[in-house]
Image (cartoon, grey):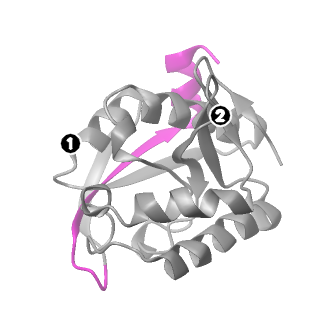
């Protein structure tokens, strides 16, 4: 498993003992407000999600990283790359995403973690394009996407959930030009 380090964070592989903290994040209505239909997830659903995140790494060589604060080792959420099967009209695609414990919002952690994961996707895994999908009302995620260099391409609706979303994207060439990578 790949480990990435930033100034304040470690992006690492998943451990069994991450489940309690992950389940707590997924059970927070404010965290889940703009995720799919806005429903919280229970411990069983979080455990299934954790299994899928681990499997993604084996299948693709990339995935979602567990994110912890370097100074304390505290797990605060996840960030990384996934295939957005929930939105068939963008396929084939790879999505950059993040989900953090609400107590850690507003400190730049989402941008810092997602930036490291995006760099990994383009420079280490050779991806040519990465998208990010957000609920149209999620202005916090819109700001993170802007800082990452993604631009809004179009709006659509998620099938099955009927949630309005905005699709943002960046190519590897755009990334290299913007971040001199």
Residue 93 in sight in this render: no
The reply, left or right, for residue 63 in relation to residue 38 is right
The total of numbered circles placed on residues is: 2
Helix, strand or loop at label 1? It is helix
The C terminus - image quarter? top right
**Measuring 33% from the left and 64% from the top, which residue is drawn there?**
35
**Quarter-wise, where is residue 122 in the image?**
top right
Helix, strand or loop at label 2? It is loop
State which region is magenta.
159-181
Query: For mark 1, what is the residue?
Result: 139
The reply, left or right, for residue 92 in relation to residue 149 is right
In front: label 1 or label 2: 2
**Residue 109 location (% of width, % of height):** 46, 30
Local packing at callout 1 (Cα closer than 10 Å; few below 14, some 14-19, many 20+) is: few
**Residue 18 location (% of width, % of height):** 64, 57
The reply, left or right, for residue 11 in relation to residue 139 is right
**Measuring 60% from the left and 17% from the top, which residue is drawn there?**
7
Image position of 113 with respect to 22: above or below = above
**Residue 41 location (% of width, % of height):** 40, 74
Could you say which is closer to the camera, residue 172 or residue 29? 29
Query: For mark 2, what is the residue?
Result: 73
**Measuring 77% from the left and 37% from the top, which residue is drawn there?**
3
Image position of 13 with respect to 179: above or below = below
**Residue closest to the far bottom:** 160
**Quarter-wise, where is residue 58 in the image?**
bottom right
| Disc on res. 168 | none
**Residue 31 location (% of width, % of height):** 31, 55
What whole-number distance in Å separates the C-alpha atoms at marks 1 and 2?
A: 29 Å
């Amino acid at each position: 498993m790949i480990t990435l380090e930033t100034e304040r964070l470690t992006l690492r592989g998943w451990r069994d003992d991450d489940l309690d903290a992950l389940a707590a994040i997924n059970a927070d209505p404010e965290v889940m407000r703009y995720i799919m239909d806005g429903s919280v997830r229970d411990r069983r659903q979080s455990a299934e999600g954790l299994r899928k995140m681990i499997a993604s790494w084996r299948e693709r060589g990339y995935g979602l990283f567990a994110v912890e604060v370097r100074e304390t080792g505290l797990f605060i959420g996840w960030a990384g790359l996934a295939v957005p099967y929930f939105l068939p009209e963008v396929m084939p695609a790879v999505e950059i995403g993040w989900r953090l414990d609400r107590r850690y919002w507003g400190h730049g952690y989402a941008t810092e973690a997602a930036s490291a994961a995006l760099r990994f996707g383009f420079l280490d895994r050779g991806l040519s394009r990465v998208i990010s999908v957000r609920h149209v009302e999620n202005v916090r995620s819109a700001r993170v996407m802007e800082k990452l260099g993604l631009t809004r391409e179009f709006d659509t609706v998620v099938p099955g959930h009927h949630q309005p979303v905005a699709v943002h994207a960046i190519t590897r060439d755009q990334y290299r030009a913007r971040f001199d990578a």
